Amino acid sequence: MEAPNPEFMREAIRLSIEKMQAGFGGPFGAVVVKDGQIIARGFNQVTTTHDPTCHAEIDAIRKACQALGTFQLDGCDLYTSCEPCPMCLGAIYWARPARVFFGSTKADAAAMGFDDHFIYDEIEKPLAERSIPMQPLLRTEALASFRAWEAHVSRTQY
C-alpha cells in the first residue's frame, strides 16, 4: 500500500479554507483518492444548502461514489482536513474506503466550537435518557420491510 501523500491532505486543507472564505460553510475539506488520483472533492456546505448532513466528508463520498458508479469506495483513500465527526465516521464505515487520513483533531475542532462530544455521549445513553426522545413504535409492522428485503430476489447486499 502506498504511503500517505501530503499533497492530497494539502488539497483538503486548501478546500477547507477556500470554500469557507467563499461563504460555503465551515472550515472543512476532503478529497477521495483512487490509484493516486483525486476522484472527488468535498467541502462543508451545511449553512448554504440548509443541509445538516452536508459535511465535507459526506460531500466527497457522495461525489466519489457517483464518479465510480458504486456505493462503496473499495481501494480509495479519504483525506480530510479534520478528524471526522460521528455522522461522517458512520458514512465512512458504510462507504468502506481503504484508509482515512485527517489533519486537525476532534479536540482542535471542539476548541473552535465544533464540539461533537455530546453525540458520542448520547449514543451510549439508554433511549429514554437521550436529549431527543426516542422510542420504538409499530416494530411488528416495521419488520415487514425486513421480511420483504429478505425475500427480494434481486437485492444488493451491502
Image (tube, rainbow, N blue to C red):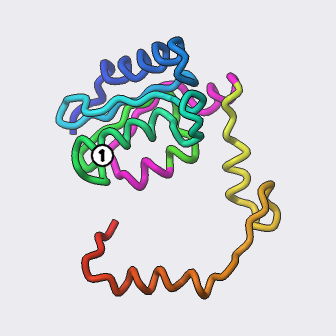
Name the kind of residue labelled 1 in the image. Cys
For the point 50% across and 52% down, the residue is 90
Is residue 6 placed above or below 79 in the rendered structure? above
Report the number of numbered marks.
Answer: 1
Indicate the secondary structure of the residue bearing disc 1. helix
Q: Circle 1 sits on which residue? A: 65
Magenta highlight on residue 136: no
**Residue 158 x/y as whole percent:** 34, 65
* Label 1 CA crowd tier, 10 Å (few <14, some 14–19, many 20+): some
Task: Determine whether, in the image, residue 135 is placed left or right of residue 99.
Answer: right
- Outermost residue on the left side: it is 35
For the point 59% across and 40% down, the residue is 52
**Residue 73 x/y as whole percent:** 29, 48
Q: Which residues are magenta?
A: 90-112
**Residue 65 x/y as whole percent:** 30, 46
Residue 129, image quadrant: bottom right
Residue 132, image quadrant: bottom right
Is residue 81 placed above or below 127 in the rendered structure? above
For the point 51% across and 37% down, the residue is 54
For the point 45% across and 41% down, the residue is 58
Seen from the viewer's position, the closer of residues 38 and 144 is 144
Magenta highlight on residue 101: yes
**Residue 121 x/y as whole percent:** 72, 51
Task: Determine whether, in the image, residue 129 is placed left or right of residue 55.
Answer: right
Task: Determine whether, in the image, residue 140 is placed left or right of residue 30.
Answer: right
Task: Determine whether, in the image, residue 50 is placed left or right of residue 151.
Answer: right
Quarter placement of the N terminus: top left
